[in-house]
Image (cartoon, helix red, strand yellow):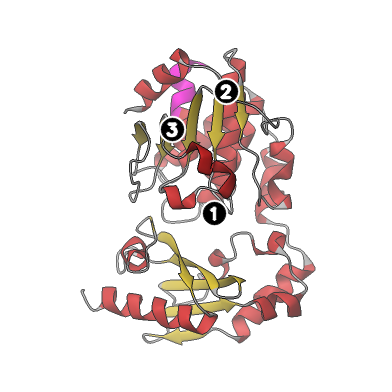
Amino acid sequence: MTHQEAAQFLTEHDNYLILTHKRPDGDTIGCGVGLCHLLRKMGKTAWLLPSLDATALFQEYLEGVQAPEGYTPDTVVSVDVATLGLLPPNAQPYVGRIDLAIDHHPSQEFFAKETCLEADKAACGEILWEIAQDLGVMDETIATPLYVAVSTDTGCFVYANTTPHTHRVAAGLMEQGIDFKRLNKKHFRTKSVARMRLESLLLQGLYLCHDNTVAVATLSLDVMAKAGATNDDTEDIAAFVGQLEGLRHSATIRELKPGECKISMRTNADYLDACAVCAHLGGGGHKAAAGCTVMGSVEEAKAAILQAIDQELNRK
């Protein structure tokens, strides 16, 4: 389905419930909230499925849009969700009845009845911008979360996925009068003391290989406790390691609970496909940024991702 067809779909339906992915980032939250406000401006009934694990960083955007208990939707839409495995536990009742998926991941599994996929877009927020343009609906309340979506998925427009289209979308959103200065300060230039301690500890335990072009950082529960950090302090922590001079690829392993680790992979896509690496471990994403979950200890997850990296590098 094209973005024009998705816009027509949204016009023809009502009573929406919007699904975001678990451990939500700025793109899924921004798209969900932006779509909710867009639909409401069109006179539709729309709510977001309550986000169970959104960090404090995103709470302000969720005010007034999370579905009340007992709400029964007629139309279910997911945003920035590539696989059913990324849905949170409270979204499980809607598996099998998702009417439209709007996404930008090449690893999209086409689980919905209709899918609007644009894998060349840096952020799902860019697709929502196109849909809003097709509908002729836009204001500051829609533009603000969409700016969060686009800016966070591009690292404030410095990641390699940023395109001329990304900048055109950002400019259009800024023209709606959003407080982009505050948003940039909040999301890209503010760190807690605990976050800074966390970054220091990550560097102390950094593992380098392949002539220092590959790094693996481990974020165990013990490290979190030592830094005095919470989930709020780990937002986009995977981008931190990639700043190391001379580095091409990095994997950040975060221990979610004993026996379960989340791996975030960031690569120079000209040399290594992050999605292909994570696919070895049941994950997916983009060529330069992907992720997966490994059941096991931090050391087991480290061994698994290093093996997957070696397998893909050896194919070159």
Residue where numbered disc 3 is placed: 97
Q: Which corner quadrant holds the C terminus?
A: bottom left
Residue type at numbered disc 3:
Arg
Q: Is residue 52 above or below residue 129?
A: below
Taking the spot 59% from the left edge, 25% from the top edge, the residue there is 72
Label 3 crowd bin: few (<14), some (14–19), many (20+), radius 10 Å? some
Whether the magenta-drawn stretch holds residue 123 is answered as no
Q: In the drawing, does residue 178 fall left or right of residue 212?
A: right
State which mark lies toward you, 3 or 2.
Answer: 3
Decide which of tag 1 and tag 3 comes sooner along the chain.
Answer: 3
The residue that appears at 34% across and 44% down in the rendered structure is 119
| Along the viewing direction, whichever of 262 and 149 lies nearer the viewer | 262
Report, in whole angstroms, how far the alpha carbon at label 1 lies from the one at label 3.
Answer: 33 Å
Residue 248: x and y in percent read 40, 72
- The dominant secondary structure in magenta is helix
Local packing at callout 2 (Cα closer than 10 Å; few below 14, some 14-19, many 20+) is many
Q: Which mark is residue 155?
A: 1
- The residue tagged 2 is 38
Is residue 228 shown to the viewer in this render? yes
Task: State the residue in front, 11 or 70.
Answer: 70
Residue 3 in the image, given as x and y percentages of width and height: 37, 27
Q: Looking at the rendering, which quadrant does residue 35 occupy?
A: top right
**Residue name at image x 56 percent, y 25 percent:** 73
Residue 146 visible in the snapshot:
no
Q: Residue at x 59, y 60 (%)?
A: 236
The CA span between labels 3 and 2 is: 22 Å
